[in-house]
Amino acid sequence: MKTVTPRSTCPISYTLDIFGDKWTLLIMRDLLLNGKKSFSEFLASDEKIASNILADRMNMLLKEGLVTKRVSPENKSKFLYEPTQKGIDLIPVLCEITLWAENYSPQRACKAFTEPLKTRRTQTIANLKKRFYKQPGQE
C-alpha cells in the first residue's frame, strides 16, 4: 500500500502526497460525483484502473480517513465504500478542477454538470454534499 509521508509542512505538498498520483482523485471523483460505491463499479470507470492499483489506493484512502468500507447489506461478500466528512470536503475542490478543465480541456466537461456550477455554485455544491448525509431512518 502507498504510504503517505509528508515531505514538508506546505499544504499543497501535503495534498499532493495524498492525491499526487493519476488515480486517487479519479477514485474520489467517482465516489463523490458519480455515485460509485463498490470495487467493481470503480473498476468499470472509463480510465480502466488496474485492480491492484485500485486496491492500493482504496487502502490508502481508508488509512487517510477519506473513505469508510462496509459490507453490502444485499451481498455479504461485497464491500461498499463511502466518503467520510474529510472526503466529502473534497467536493468543492473537484468542482473547481472541473470548471478549470472546462476552460482549458479540448474534451470539455459535461454541460449538465458545469452549467449549474457556473450559475449556482454554492447551491450546487451544497446539493452534492447533501447526498452523503444520512436522514433519520436511513441505513
Image: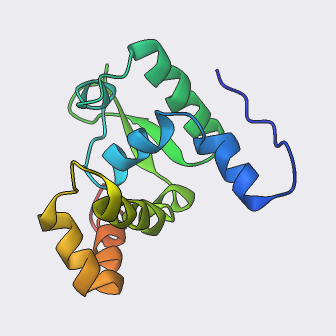
Q: Based on the displayed image, in which of its 4 quarters is residue 130 positioned? A: bottom left
Q: Position of residue 107 (x, y in %)?
A: 21, 48
Q: How many marks?
A: 0
The structure's colour scheme is: rainbow
Q: Position of residue 83 (x, y in %)?
A: 45, 51
Image quadrant containing the N terminus: top right
Q: Is residue 107 left or right of residue 31?
A: left
Q: Position of residue 35 (x, y in %)?
A: 25, 49
Question: Viewer-proximal residue, 54 or 74?
Answer: 54
Question: Viewer-proximal residue, 134 or 12?
Answer: 12
**Residue drawn 19% across and 65% down?**
113
**Residue drawn 73% across and 35% down?**
4
Q: Based on the displayed image, in which of its 4 quarters is residue 30 positioned? A: top left
Question: Viewer-proximal residue, 61 or 133?
Answer: 61
- Depicted 67 relative to depicted 9: above or below: above
Question: Viewer-proximal residue, 18 or 70?
Answer: 18
Q: Based on the displayed image, in which of its 4 quarters is residue 71 positioned? A: top left
Q: Farthest residue in the right direction?
A: 8
Image quadrant containing the C terminus: bottom left
Q: Is residue 21 left or right of residue 137?
A: right
**Residue drawn 23% across and 86% down?**
119
Q: Position of residue 84 (x, y in %)?
A: 51, 55
**Residue drawn 36% across and 85% down?**
122
Q: Is residue 54 left or right of residue 76?
A: right
- Depicted 135 relative to depicted 132: above or below: below
